[in-house]
Amino acid sequence: MNLWIPVLVATAGTYAFKLAGYFVPDRFTQHPHFNQVARLLPIGLLTGLIAVQTFADGQAIVLDGRIIGASVAVLLLMRRAPFIVVVFSAALVTAVGRHFGVWI
């Protein structure tokens, strides 16, 4: 039961935050700074998620095959490869490297 309390509180908070967005006056949402932040915020959040998933294992910083996979993904994205090719290539490079013991 102790685990459900934070889950329910987070759920209610998320719903309240989303609901509060409907009450924001239009003059705020039409402001250029608001639009710029709204456009760039998902990029920052996704970058943070990728960094945490690539370089962290619990509370420790790790350097392993995920870095090589992420590097392959970045290179393919810079070459404007299709997203599905980027995902499969990064996963394949990481899996093959781990299988043959090139990196852990």
Image: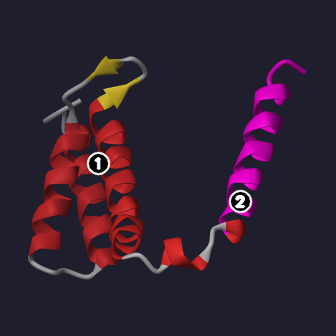
Q: Helix, strand or loop at disc 1?
A: helix
Colour basis: secondary structure
Q: Is residue 10 magenta?
A: yes
Q: Residues within 10 Å of mark 2 (few under 14, many from 20)?
A: few
Q: Is the magenta stretch mostly helix, strand or loop?
A: helix
Up the image or down, 55 lies above or below 84; here it is above
Image x and y of residue 103, in percent: 17, 33
Residue at 39%, 17% (x, y): give it.
59
Mark 2 = which residue?
A: 20
Out of 93 and 10, give the one closest to the viewer: 10
Residue drawn 21% across the image and 51% down it: 69
Q: Give the quarter of the image for residue 52.
A: top left
Residue sitting farthest toward the front: 27
Judging depth in this view, the residue of 85 and 48 nearest the camera is: 48
Give whichever of discs 1 and 2 has the lower sequence position: 2
Q: In which quarter of the image is residue 56?
A: top left
Residue 9 vs 94, above or below: the answer is: above
Q: Callout 2: helix, strand or loop?
A: helix
Query: What span is colored magenta in the figure?
Result: 1-21
Residue that sits furthest to the right in the current view? 1
CA–CA distance in space, label 1 to label 2: 44 Å
Tell us which disc is closer to us: 1 or 2.
Answer: 2
The reply, left or right, for residue 85 in relation to residue 25 is left
Based on the picture, tell me whether residue 59 belongs to the magenta stretch. no
Residue 71, percent across and down? 14, 53
Q: Name the residue under label 1.
A: 95
Q: Which amino acid does label 1 sit on?
A: Ala
Q: In this view, does 88 lie to the left or right of 69?
A: right
> Amino acid type of disc 2?
Ala
